Amino acid sequence: MVGSASGSTPTLPRAEGEGPRGPLVRRDPEEAAQEAYDEFIRAELGEAAAKQARDGEAFS
């Protein structure tokens, strides 16, 4: 038998800095795409740019 003798389910290794994840939930694909876009903009351009993109304002 491979694994621990306690019978617990082995955990998969996670990338450094990655916390526990909640259960997978089916979501609206459009909502998920918008959230991914917002996260990308926030990471690349900052929070103010993400807010502008979310609010539909043009960049000046």
Image (cartoon, helix red, strand yellow):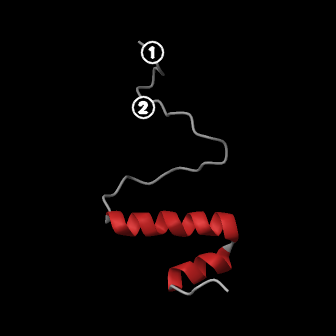
Looking at the rendered image, the quarter that the N terminus falls into is top left
Query: Residue 24: x, y in percent?
Result: 37, 53
Mark 2: few, some, or many residues within 10 Å (few <14, many ≥20)? Answer: few
Which residue, given by chain and number where applicable, does mark 1 sit on?
2
Q: How many marks?
A: 2
Q: Nearer the viewer, residue 59 or 11?
A: 59
Which residue, given by chain and number where applicable, does mark 2 sit on?
9
Q: Amino acid at mark 2?
A: Thr
Residue 50 appears left or right of 21: right
Q: Is residue 55 above or below residue 8?
A: below
Callout 1: helix, strand or loop?
A: loop
Query: Residue 34: x, y in percent?
Result: 45, 69
Q: Is residue 59 above or below residue 1?
A: below
Residue 27 appears left or right of 41: left
Disc on the earlier residue, 2 or 1 = 1
Query: Residue 60: x, y in percent?
Result: 67, 86
Q: Residue at horizontal 40%, vertical 26%?
A: 7
| Residue 32 picture quarter | bottom left
Q: Residue at horizontal 44%, vertical 54%?
A: 22
Q: Amino acid at mark 1?
A: Val
Residue 42: mark in rendering: none
| Residue 14 picture quarter | top right
Residue 33 appears left or right of 59: left
Q: CA distance from mark 2 to mark 1?
A: 11 Å
Q: Residue at horizontal 67%, vertical 64%?
A: 44
Q: Residue at horizontal 47%, vertical 20%?
A: 3
Mark 1: few, some, or many residues within 10 Å (few <14, many ≥20)? Answer: few
Q: Nearer the viewer, residue 6 or 31?
A: 31
Callout 2: helix, strand or loop?
A: loop
